[in-house]
Amino acid sequence: MTSTRSASHAANQSSLADRFTRAQAALASAEEHLRAATRNVSNGWYIRDRLGNGFWSPEIFNVFNLRISTVAPPPSIAFACLRRNERERLLGSVDRSFEERVDCVAEYRLELANDVVKSARSSGHMIDNLFGFDRALMMGAFVETTPEVTARRAIFVAQKELSGGVSTAEFDAAIEAESWRTRWHDSAAGLSLRQWEQFCEFLDRHPVSVLRVADIARAVGLAESRFSQAFKATTGDTPYRFLLVVRLDRARRALLAAPTTKIANIASDFGFFDQSHFSRHFRKHFGRTPGELLESIDNRFSDNVRD
């Protein structure tokens, strides 16, 4: 019996070592992409009127793979590189800036010749009577974010590798990356990667048990209805359902970090009505109740002591 347990323990240790090896490789890749992101940055600036006439700095021409000129290309050339929904979103944002005299910030992808895809971020500020012009102009900055986006994706891959051990090594979940952070995927109708990071940062700063969807939407700069639509396109879940998963994930981490804490107290801390309500959702999501999880930890500890 003891030899069987020892063999099982050795197999688990080997599996855990394999996961850590994959995680280390993913982290090394993420670090390399981050270094590339700091080295390969293309920043430019522009001035334009409402019709799109104006000036681009040479860096922007280079990002679009266009010949450098003393004037910006016709707007149709630039907008042709955007997907339809992103083009409509950017045009709407620019129109609003000119109508309401507010700043404009947008993230989008450029689909260029030879199947080249780049990511970019632009910001614009409204200025009246610049250089003696009698019409409103937008002056702004343009940044190619392709290396940055690639680095962020590599980080998400690394996080996914790290959190992959959660389901098979629950005792280590208290220190592993939270798996819900890896739920972002690129969707034309969804949240941008930056908005997803703002969402994660907002959850880190506030108790998830008291969060409202309206508060989160405001934090990422979207109306509540638009945020809910974009969120579902990104994760496949409604914000309410997703926040429930986060609460359960953090409640489990709290249980594992302090297994002697009363389950009823954990339920209250994470916004569940009572222990029964918490246990029902916990079983549905993790396949067992909080009590069964704690019992498995006790048994695992006992087996290790006997081995």
Image (cartoon, rainbow, N blue to C red):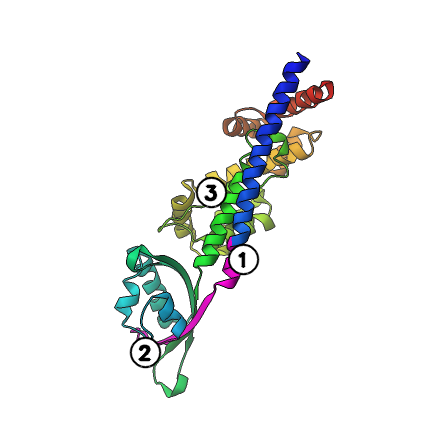
Label placed on residue 202: none
Choose mark 2 or mark 3, whichever is in front: 2
For the residue pair 84 and 231, the one nearer the viewer reads as: 84
Q: Amino acid at mark 1?
A: Arg
Q: Is residue 303 magenta?
A: no
Q: Where is residue 97 shown, x and y percent of the image?
A: 38, 69
Callout count: 3
Q: Which residues are magenta?
A: 33-57
- Residue plotted at (40% across, 44% down): 232
State whether residue 202 is above or below residue 15: below
Instruction: Mark yes or no: residue 263 visible.
Output: yes
| Disc 3: which residue | 183
- Residue plotted at (43% across, 41% down): 238
Q: Is residue 89 left or right of residue 307?
A: left
Label placed on residue 71: 2
The quadrant in which residue 265 appears is: top right
